[in-house]
């Protein structure tokens, strides 16, 4: 039972944390998440307001109020985040960040690009593109900096530590775990006196353990435990593991239920078998 859950964690570490394609598949939709989008809008608004305040002759405050800046950013940022240019830059930043993440998880990095807060990814938004989408006056846009850097913490340090433990487990057991599970399972069935009962019990135990592990993950992802963007990123990264646990629980539960049903059907007397009792001469009707 325990080895099955360990195998799920190992597969998740290999296919999500250590795989660039798996990492990108999990994290790439992050900027378009509604909660994250609001945080990015707030970030852009603060930086744009500061840039307007620093503009020559303070033309920014004279042309746009804080509320107008907020509305312009709220209209423009979702379009920019969905653009091909931003998606390409986001993918490149994630690929670079993942390369550093693998070094950190395997203790091959001296934290050269990982900040004290964790793994940060920075993508610059071209203000020319933002100004076009927001409809900023040309006079104003020409006095703004070329780019606004958007930096987000994807994984906090405490989560990096937990992920490093999972990766260490994956590195140690990935080559022998499936063979060990298969071998021990067959040996257990061969040594059991009541093999069907032992198989049903084992499957039910795995289903319960997988369901409990999924509940623990959900509890660990309770809101407020991390900054919003890091919290959403953690949910995206752990989603494949949570899905695997649910799949394991459902398959084991259905298999155990099928075995129980088959045993129950086999134990029932067949009510439709015709009687083979022969009639005696006394029972035969007389002519």
Image: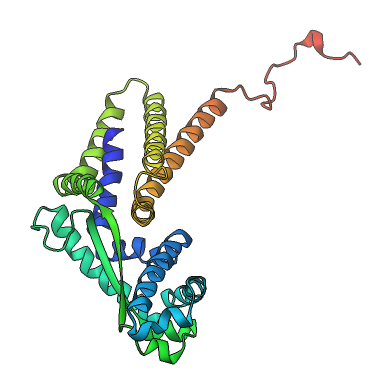
Extreme-right residue of the structure: 287
Q: Nearer the viewer, residue 207 or 222?
A: 222
Is 8 on the left or on the right of 49, as rendered?
A: left
Is 129 on the left or on the right of 177, as rendered?
A: right
Q: Indicate the position of residue 223 as horizontal and vertical percent values.
A: 42, 45
Q: Which image quadrant for residue 252?
A: top left
Residue at image position (30%, 39%) is 4
Q: Is residue 203 above or below residue 176?
A: above
In what quadrant of the picture does the C terminus appear? top right
What colour scheme has been applied to the protein in the rendered image?
Answer: rainbow
**Residue 29 seen in the current view:** no
**Residue 177 seen in the current view:** yes
Q: Which image quadrant for residue 18?
A: bottom left
Q: Indicate the position of residue 81 as horizontal and vertical percent values.
A: 42, 74
Q: Which image quadrant for residue 25?
A: bottom left
Q: Nearer the viewer, residue 192 or 102?
A: 102
In what quadrant of the picture does the N terminus appear? top left
Q: Nearer the viewer, residue 180 or 224?
A: 224
Give the mark count.
Answer: 0
Q: Is residue 34 above or below residue 203?
A: below
Q: Is residue 232 above or below residue 273?
A: below
Residue at image position (46%, 36%) is 253
Residue at image position (29%, 59%) is 153
Is 156 on the left or on the right of 77, as rendered?
A: left
Q: Nearer the viewer, residue 100 or 280?
A: 100
Q: Indicate the position of residue 169 as horizontal and vertical percent values.
A: 18, 44
Q: Indicate the position of residue 67 as horizontal and vertical percent values.
A: 51, 70
């Amino acid at each position: 039972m325990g080895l099955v859950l360990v195998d799920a964690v190992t597969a998740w570490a290999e296919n999500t944390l250590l795989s660039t394609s798996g990492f990108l598949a999990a994290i790439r939709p992050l900027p378009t998440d509604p909660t994250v989008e609001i945080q990015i809008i707030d970030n852009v608004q603060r930086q744009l307001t500061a840039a307007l305040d620093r503009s020559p002759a303070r033309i920014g405050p004279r042309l746009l109020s804080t509320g107008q800046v907020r509305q312009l950013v709220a209209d423009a940022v979702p379009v920019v985040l969905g653009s091909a240019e931003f998606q390409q830059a986001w993918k490149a930043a994630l690929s670079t960040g993942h390369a550093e993440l693998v070094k950190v998880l395997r203790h091959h990095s001296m934290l050269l690009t990982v900040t004290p807060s964790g793994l940060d990814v920075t993508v610059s938004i071209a203000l020319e593109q933002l100004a076009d989408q927001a409809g900023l006056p040309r006079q104003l846009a020409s006095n703004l900096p070329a780019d606004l850097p958007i930096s987000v913490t994807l994984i906090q340090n405490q989560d990096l530590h937990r992920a490093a433990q999972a990766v260490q487990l994956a590195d140690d057991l990935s080559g022998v775990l499936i063979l060990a599970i298969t071998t021990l399972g067959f040996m257990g069935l061969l040594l059991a006196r009541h093999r069907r009962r032992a198989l049903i019990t084992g499957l039910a135990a795995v289903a319960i353990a997988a369901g409990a592990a999924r509940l623990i993950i959900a509890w660990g992802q309770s809101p407020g435990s991390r900054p919003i963007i890091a919290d959403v990123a953690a949910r995206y990264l752990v989603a494949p593991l949570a899905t695997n646990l649910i799949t394991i629980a459902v398959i084991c539960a259905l298999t155990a239920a099928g075995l129980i049903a088959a045993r129950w059907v086999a134990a029932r007397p067949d009510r439709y078998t015709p009687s083979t009792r022969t009639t005696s001469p006394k029972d035969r009707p007389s002519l």
